[in-house]
Image (cartoon, grey):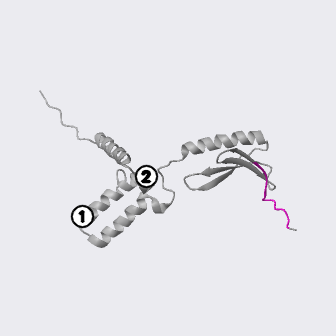
Amino acid sequence: MAKTSKNQVSKLKHIRAGLAIYQTGRSPFWQLRIWDNVSKKYIRRSTKETSRLDAIEAATEFADSNRRKADPNQAVNKDRSFEAYAKKFDAFNKAKNGNSRSYSDGRKILFRESDGLISYFGKHDVGKITSGVMRDFLVHLDSQWTCRAFVPPQVLV
């Protein structure tokens, strides 16, 4: 007969959908398990509690704070991010146009530090960029330009 493993889950308590706490033979502490819809994986952390009631409270607090921090617009894989597609587009333009002026102008628009497309949309999922997100980007650009706007000289009377 096979031995029982110390890593085996000995006690399991489901709290709500996607959230459970469990205990293994290796640790006196309760562990929490949260289902992450974005990455389609479980997040596992220690609650650092030996009491089941305290562990349930710690797990629900962690789950609530984790749900608030998650950005649904962020890409799960780097392959789906705006930055990956922008780099592919840049490589295509380089192969097509070489060192022409239009290529260098397009590259500057993509890779500008403060107001470039990659600095704003870099981690966004390409499928979740909508016209509303583009409008927010344009408002962001307008707010930057009003800070650096040209102030006309005062007219002396």
Residue at (62, 51) in percent of width and height:
35
Residue under label 1, please give it.
102
Is 4 magenta? The answer is: yes
Counting from the top left corner in percent of width and height, residue 23 is at: 77, 51
Q: Which residues are magenta?
A: 2-12
Where in the figure is residue 106, as x and y percent of width and height?
Answer: 29, 61
According to the image, label 2 marks what residue? 128
Q: Residue at x 61, y 41 (%)?
A: 64
Relative to 137, 38 lies left or right: right
Side of 84 relative to 65 (left or right): left
In this rendered view, identify the residue nearer to me: 56 or 115: 56
Residue 98 visible to the viewer: no
Compare marks 1 and 2 and give the one earlier in the sequence.
Answer: 1
Residues 115 and 150: in front is: 115
Are the two marked residues, 1 and 2, in contact with CB atoms closer than 8 angstroms? no
Residue most extreme to the right: 1
Quadrant in the picture for the C terminus: top left
Measure how far apart labels 1 and 2 are at the Cα level: 28 Å
Dot 2 amino acid type = Lys
Q: Residue at x 39, y 56 (%)?
A: 118
Is 66 colored magenta in this rendering? no
Residue 26, given in percent of the width and then of the height, sits at 80, 56
Using the rendered image of the protein, determine whether residue 37 is visible from the camera's viewpoint.
yes
- Mark 1 crowd level (few <14, some 14–19, many ≥20, 10 Å Cα): few
1 or 2: mark nearer the eye: 2
Q: Secondary structure at mark 1?
A: helix
- In the image, which disc is placed on residue 36? none
SS of the residue under disc 2: helix
